[in-house]
Image (cartoon, coloured by chain):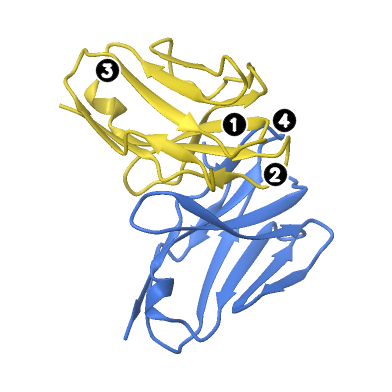
Amino acid sequence: GAGVSQTPSNKVTEKGKYVELRCDPISGHTALYWYRQSLGQGPEFLIYFQGTGAADDSGLPNDRFFAVRPEGSVSTLKIQRTERGDSAVYLCASSTGWGDIQYFGAGTRLSVL
Amino acid sequence: SQQGEEDPQALSIQEGENATMNCSYKTSINNLQWYRQNSGRGLVHLILIRSNEREKHSGRLRVTLDTSKKSSSLLITASRAADTASYFCATANQAGTALIFGKGTTLSVSS
């Protein structure tokens, strides 16, 4: 594809439910990143994949958050037992490699009611 | 935690005027990047300036970097209504595995 694709664009869920957010990176990009952005703030790093492995997951706020990238392309961010404080825009980015320019998707706006 | 801090938080100008946004950061860097975000969604990469560069141009954009002051500025010349957006500076974390963004400057350009 031409750019990073994220689905769904909007997700509304109830407190306590499980959600999955999907990211399709630019073809050939080995590095993939997830960020979370709250209203009025800049994006905050969650996790970085190099290939299939999570090279840095230090930004995940707690063990309710988990992300996978089983084939080194598409990634899924999984949130268990959602809380209202999880409401934010979740952004995915990809790059050709470590330290290279990151290209962002349009994000998934998650609303936890 | 936020590495960069943009200033001002909000800026309103008329079309044709220049807009200047500033960014300060805390740790040593290899490069600094500026991104634009429309309507709170995806970020678009604007320009990257390396630590050994002092100034860089791209179209109507001019970025300066002062590593001694740990600061950068983004100048948009001859602004247009389409420049209305939030602008963020970003630097890499120590491991180089993530970008750290400031809170951004919200620019409004009225026609």
Q: Distance between the residues labelled 2 and 4?
A: 12 Å
Q: Residue type at mark 3: give it.
A: Thr
Q: How crowded is mark 3: few (under 14 residues within 10 Å), some or many (20 or more)?
A: many
Question: Which label is found at residue B107?
Answer: none
Whether labels 1 and 2 share one chain = no
Tell me how many marks there are.
Answer: 4
User: Can you give x and y, in whole percent of width and height, for residue B28 in the image?
Assistant: 75, 46
Q: Residue type at mark 1: give it.
A: Leu
Question: Which label is found at residue B95?
Answer: 4
User: Can you give x and y, in whole percent of width and height, for residue B90 in the image?
Assistant: 59, 50
Q: How far apart are marks 1 and 2 (CA)?
A: 24 Å
Question: Which label is found at residue B27?
Answer: 2
Residue labelled with disc 1: A32
Whether labels 2 and 3 share one chain = no
Chain in blue in the render: B
Q: Which residue does the image show at 50% across and 33% down from the upper left?
A: A24
Q: Residue type at mark 2: give it.
A: Thr
Q: How far apart are marks 1 and 4 (CA)?
A: 15 Å
Indicate the quadrant containing the C terminus of chain B: top left, top right, bottom left or bottom right: bottom left
**Which chain does tag 4 point to?**
B
